[in-house]
Image: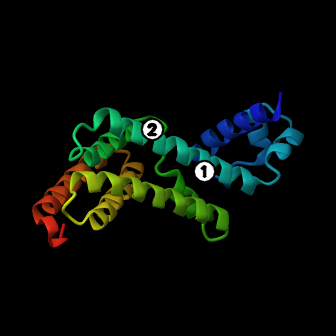
Amino acid sequence: MDLDEARTRILDAADQLFYDRGIQSVGMDELRTAAGVSLKRLYQCFPAKQDLVEAYLRRRDARWRASLAGYVTEHGGAPDRRPLAVFDWLHDWFSEPDFRGCAFINSFGELGATSDGVRRVAREHKLALLAYLTELVRAAVPDGAPDALAGQVALLVDGAIAGAAISGDPAAARQARTAAESLLTAGAAGGGRGKP
């Protein structure tokens, strides 16, 4: 098995185990066994658990944001409806049996106080999500206050994720969608006044 294949298998195992059970509860030996690689190969690919955690989060970020953007592009419709499609995608995600909330918030909660790398990757993920939401809101409400509205929509996204994870009810996405629709409607009506 070459390094690329081993790396992929290790990241696949990490993605499942870290997301399902948390980072600190999963040891490197368990990851090695789940990935089907030797301990030597594991440490060739990831010299420290911290390296693996950051790689896991970066890959999860890329996949998560690509899935979201793909859904919005395919199902979002007109630009003024695309920010709301974000919440439809969230509802689908929340309905999956292995949904455990936001991997970045979870990782930050576990390790953010002691790991600069985890803190940095979690912040980068949230900033990238905010940038994407800002693009959607600018297209939906070009004469409003898109930056402020996008920040509010981002808070609704995070709140819906946390609410659904804790309650086990995907309806949090629908409730957040309703709130986002109200914000966007008010933002469009506010026009150039800059008030959402």
Left or right, 125 with respect to 147, comes to: right
Classify the position of the N terminus by image quarter: top right
SS at circle 1: helix
Q: Nearer the viewer, residue 173 or 100?
A: 173
**Distance of label 1 from label 2 (alpha carbons):** 15 Å
- Residue 99 can be seen in this image: no
- Circle 1: residue type: Leu
- Nearer the camera: disc 1 or disc 2: 2
Classify the position of the C terminus by image quarter: bottom left
Comes first in the chain, label 1 or label 2: 1
SS at circle 2: helix
Figure label count: 2
Could you tell me residue 38's position as x and y percent? Answer: 86, 36
Q: Nearer the viewer, residue 72 or 51?
A: 72
Write the residue at 49% across / 37% down. 98
- Residue 176 can be seen in this image: yes
Is the residue marked by circle 1 packed among few (<14), some (14-19), or many (20+) residues within 10 Å? many
Is the residue marked by circle 2 packed among few (<14), some (14-19), or many (20+) residues within 10 Å? few
Could you tell me residue 7's position as x and y percent? Answer: 75, 38
Write the residue at 66% across / 54% down. 54
Say which quarter of the image contains residue 41: top right
Say which quarter of the image contains residue 93: top left
Left or right, 79 with respect to 154, comes to: left
Looking at the image, is 26 positioned above or below residue 89? below
Q: Nearer the viewer, residue 14 or 120?
A: 120
Write the residue at 24% across / 66% down. 145
Looking at the image, is 154 positioned above or below residue 174? below
**Residue at the spot of label 2:** 67
